[in-house]
Image: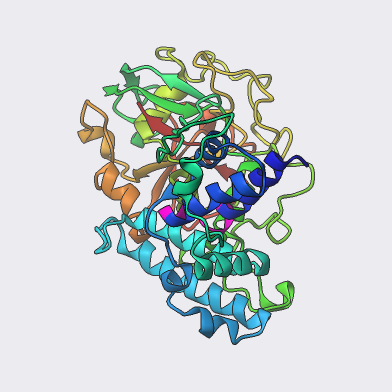
Amino acid sequence: MSNRDDFIAIIDALKIASPTITDEQRKGFLRLGVQQHGLTIDEATYILNAAGLTIGEQINYFEVLGFSIDELQSLDELAIVNHVEVAHKKLYTASLRAGGRPRVDGRTEEQWRTLLNQAREVLIDVEKRQEYIALLQNGAVPSNESISEIENTPSEQTQSVSVEQHTPSIPLEKDDMVLIPAGEFQMGSDERDAFNDEKPIHTVYVDAFYMDKYPVTNAQFKAFIDENPQWRKPLKWYESGKIDTANILREFHDGEYLKNWNKNDYPRGEDQHPATWVSWYAAMAYSQWMGKRLPTEAEWEKAARGGLIGEKYPWGSTIDASYLNYDAYIGKTTTVGKYPPNNYGLYDMIGNVYEWCLDAWNKNFYMQSPRDNPFSGDSIVQTVNNFTDIRSFRIMRGGSCVSIPQNVRVAYRSRNTPKYTCFSIGFRCVMPV
């Protein structure tokens, strides 16, 4: 490795240990880059800036989880892991139950949970923990020279430098999302085979929004639970070899959460199948982690229709097995994107898996539905911020791989408890424009 690559590796390790450094630590690492790795101030500064480190007050992860360095170092490794897991789970659960109320430290509850996850990730790993303790105790890279001496020393490459605090702004990727345009559509159905809760057909206006092209896949959901252990599959102590405290709470699933997974790995060869056996709570948590949310029922139906007017299915009025996985012809889920998309470029909007929506179930909602951006239940903001407190039935749309033709019509409505999981229920996310 080159001197530059060595320095980048050190900064990458620093970022894992702590995304926040003090100004003194910043100066110390600049000294390290110049004195020991032969970089110019400009080069070292660029590498620090590109890493996205935040300059500010040093966050003490031990204090975040409520104990001291000495308290933890007096324990053996297994006890340390258990101590961190128990503290993390207690604080994380309390934050979930707090909903959207403001915290006294100025953070949102979501920001606090992110910090708790960072603390857990660092302190549970022996190497990261040791690096982090050294970082806290040293305060900066040891050196007797001041940064000002380096900055003010003329060289062939640089005479002066201005060091700016900068965190790169990374736009949210929309490559796997489709823009659904604002506008009106006819929601529901008055046809002979329509159920009463689909009536009356009524005009709805929906603001523009982005929607995932595909249902969330097993691979995507695994990335989520890998970073958020509180949403992992519950394991019994005799399965994991230790007391497993980092997993989904019993109140957020029906006992069969991720039933088809082997511990916390999806079935072999099914990385691109839709994630199933996922409760509404877990779908909500994933959506928030992605900076998105679940679609409202009106958003879902507008997107599913693909701009067609008065049709039963996204392609027309007649069922066609070449367009969807349904009626137990295959008997299980298929990879996402196997069948043709609708006119908006969305795949698997009907068939394959039902999809959770944000709304509360109300069979008479269409009788009183507002025209603009209708939503059943508390406000969208309240529902998103306080989703762990919700107990009412939630909407599911789209039918599944075992649904009969009548139940894969775009107007068909279904529902279940937010704890419910099943092999035929998945979800996808949206993001308002």
- Picture quarter containing residue 259? bottom right
Q: Residue shown at 53%/47% (left/top)? A: 30
Q: How far across and down, in percent of the image, does residue 67 sit?
A: 46, 79
Left or right: 228, with 56 as reference point: right
Name the foreground residue: 301 vs 188. Answer: 301
Name the foreground residue: 250 vs 414. Answer: 250
Q: How far across and down, in percent of the image, does residue 109 sit?
A: 34, 57
Q: Residue shown at 46%/67% (left/top)? A: 251
- Picture quarter containing residue 126? bottom right
Q: Give the range drawn in magenta.
A: 15-23
301 relative to 86, above or below: above
Name the foreground residue: 271 vs 404. Answer: 271
Q: In which quarter of the image is the N terminus?
A: top right
Q: How far across and down, in percent of the image, does residue 42 sit?
A: 53, 34
Q: Does the magenta stretch include residue 19?
A: yes
177 relative to 116, above or below: above
Name the foreground residue: 130 vs 178. Answer: 130
Is residue 249 among what the camera can see?
A: no
Q: Residue shown at 49%/16% (left/top)? A: 344
Q: Is residue 268 magenta?
A: no
Q: Residue shown at 42%/62% (left/top)? A: 59
Is residue 3 among what the camera can see?
A: yes
Residue lying furthest bottom in this view? Answer: 74
Mark count: 0
